[in-house]
Image (tube, rainbow, N blue to C red):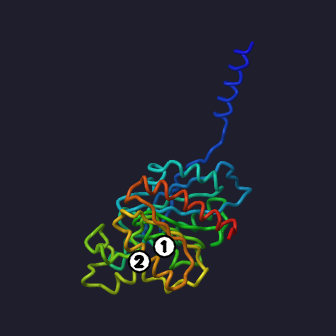
Amino acid sequence: MKNILVKILALCLILAGLNAKGATVDTALTYSAAMHKTIKATVILPADYSKNKKFPTVYLLHGYSGSYADWPHNVPNIKNLADQYDVIIVCADGNYSSWYVDSPVDPAWKYETYVSSELVKYIDAHYSTIKDRSERAITGLSMGGHGALFLAFRHQDVFGACGSMSGGVDLRPFADNWDIAKRLGKLSDYPDRWAAYSVINLTNLLKPGALAITFDCGSDDFFFKVNNDLHQKLLDEKIPHDFTSRPGGHTWQYWGNSINYQMLFFSRFFNKIK
């Protein structure tokens, strides 16, 4: 009799697991009028997603040479984070080397316009989102870390919170890397342009407390110095922010850990926890 009860209990647990709901992953086909093309995005919906409920949104940007599929593939735990914090996560595509800017060199690359305007409008029109900056955040890794802060600083009417993981927040020390010159022209020809497109030189756009900011970088990362420089500049300008450095390099292992802290930061922002 005891063995039968154990087997029945085990069967019930298996059936409960099969019926348990979890986050769902959708692939959205968005259209960019600015670039005249269709662009994919991954949309992760929390388990209790419903048209009858409105949700905050976190936009998640990939790094150089990546795509919209990078985050779900390399950090599948983000589905659990969507459930845990009851948010919609949108993994945007910034092409392999857009740096999330509207290129002054090549008008075919307008990823600032796409992510900050066209994609946000598409997501708000097709999913049950809270359509307000106070419920919208953006973060990313490496190139995407630059992109997230760049877009949030320049579009504070769109994003209320922002983050960066190992972000290239000052482009100028890396003039020969990662196709940046293809988007901006050569540093030697356009030094003022490179300065203007670097996050570290956009702090003049910030007012204390107007934008919730969190960023981090591994102590072994080649972007550590520029991130620490940004931290020091924000301190000097008395702009509230969270900055963290942990052991680690420019790796998915680091970012897979970092996203947990960033999502907690955004959840506290959405829930107005001081």
Question: The disc labelled 2 sits on which kind of residue?
Answer: Asp
Question: The disc labelled 1 sits on which kind of residue?
Answer: Leu
Q: Quadrant of residue 107?
A: bottom left
Q: Of tags 1 and 2, which is closer to the observer? A: 2
Q: Quadrant of residue 55?
A: bottom right
Instruction: Say above or below: 138 vs 260.
Output: below
Dot 2 corresponds to which residue? Answer: 229
Instruction: Say above or below: 48 vs 149.
Output: above
Residue furthest to the top in view is 1
Instruction: Locate residue 51, reporting x and y percent.
Output: 70, 55
> What label sits on residue 149 in the rendered view?
1
Residue drawn at point x = 65 percent, y = 48 percent: 47
* Sequence-wise first label, 1 or 2: 1
Judge the density around disc 2: few (<14), some (14-19), many (≥20) Cα neighbours within 10 Å. some
Residue drawn at point x = 43 percent, y = 56 percent: 254
Give SS at disc 2: helix
Quarter occupied by the N terminus: top right
Residue drawn at point x = 43 percent, y = 65 percent: 217
Instruction: Locate residue 198, reporting x and y percent.
Output: 40, 78
Judge the density around disc 1: few (<14), some (14-19), many (≥20) Cα neighbours within 10 Å. many
Q: Mark 1 and mark 2: span between their CA atoms?
A: 15 Å
Instruction: Say above or below: 19 vs 85.
Output: above
Give SS at disc 1: helix
Residue 78 relative to residue 193: left or right = right
